[in-house]
């Protein structure tokens, strides 16, 4: 597993060819991306379900969990991050299978570097367009100004703090996923914070938006409200 420390959009690369993974990672890092790599489908699934990425690049012939099976599970768990399938399988039937499984794009190896980077940029732009607003039941979380609005009522607008917005965004991007307090602490808050900080900000969000906005899953943690 390789993670870079530079600032920039996050990319998950799931590729079992270690030399190719290293090459692709270097290309992406040079373009300003932060790259997390996984060498099998199961590790890729763990990263995809527990972390936030702007783009995912997934090989098909992966050990443990095949690439398209990985992709299907991500989509079933409501992970909407744009995916580029990068594979040696270039038949029309293979391309159709990849797109039907939920991929936004499909690129066959060997590939031209310029084309590969252009496709990643396109997927990143797509992510930014989708991520600008996240559904919260009948309302929407607008990330640009950290507000929750109701399109049915122009006067219904609630402003959130940066931490409230971050917590709600994590839950809303994966509405079927139950997050533990430890996961939310790592994804949203600072290292100096404690588990109790998560509970405090859940309370703040419920006070502003109603108790139904976040469900407590007893013995596990929290998920976006399902009502």
Image (cartoon, grey):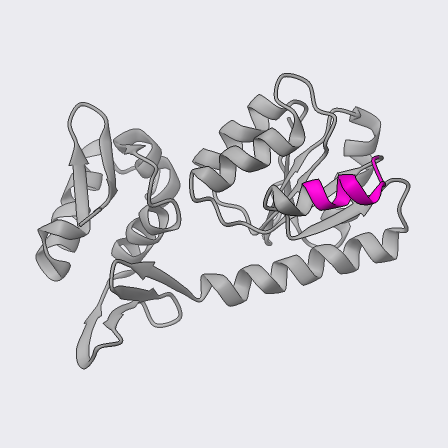
Residue nearer the viewer, 192 or 79:
79
Please, is residue 184 above or below residue 45 in the view?
Answer: below
Residue 189 image position (x, y, % from top left) = 32, 43
The residue positioned 61% from the left and 25% from the top of the image is 41
Could you tell me which quadrant the N terminus lies in?
top right
User: How many numbered dots are placed on residues in this image?
Assistant: 0
Stretch of the chain drawn in magenta: 89-97
In percent of width and height, residue 165 lies at 30, 58
Quadrant position of residue 122:
bottom right
Q: Main secondary structure of the magenta part?
A: helix
Tell which of 167 and 138 is nearer to you: 138
Q: Residue at x 84, y 57 (%)?
A: 115
- Tell me if residue 94 is in the magenta stretch: yes
- Which corner quadrant of the image does residue 219 belong to? top left
In the orientation shown, which residue stands out farthest toward the bottom? 154
Residue at point 83%, 35% (across, down): 89
Q: Is residue 103 visible?
A: yes
Residue 116 lies in the magenta-colored region: no
Q: Position of residue 24 (x, y in %)?
A: 79, 40
Q: Residue 23, position in %: x, y?
A: 82, 37
């Amino acid at each position: 597993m390789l993670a870079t420390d530079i600032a920039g959009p996050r990319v998950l690369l799931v590729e079992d060819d270690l030399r190719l993974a290293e090459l692709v990672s270097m290309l992406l890092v040079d373009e300003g991306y932060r790259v997390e790599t996984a060498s099998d489908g199961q590790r890729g699934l763990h990263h995809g379900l527990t972390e936030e990425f702007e783009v995912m690049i997934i090989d098909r012939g992966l050990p443990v969990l095949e690439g398209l099976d990985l992709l299907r599970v991500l989509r079933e768990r409501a992970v909407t991050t744009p995916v580029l399938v990068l594979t040696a399988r270039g038949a029309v039937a293979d391309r159709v299978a990849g797109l039907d499984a939920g991929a936004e794009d499909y690129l066959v190896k060997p590939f031209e570097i310029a084309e590969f980077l252009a496709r990643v940029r396109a997927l990143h732009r797509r992510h930014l367009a989708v991520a600008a607003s996240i559904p919260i039941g009948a309302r929407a979380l607008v990330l640009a100004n950290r507000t929750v609005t109701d399109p049915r009522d122009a006067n219904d607008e609630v402003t959130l703090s940066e931490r409230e917005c971050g917590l709600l965004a994590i839950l809303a991007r994966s509405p079927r996923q139950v997050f533990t307090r430890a996961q939310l602490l790592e994804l949203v808050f600072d290292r100096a914070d404690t588990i109790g900080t998560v509970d405090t900000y859940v309370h703040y969000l419920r006070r502003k938006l109603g108790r139904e906005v976040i469900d407590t899953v007893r013995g596990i943690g929290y998920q976006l409200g399902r009502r």
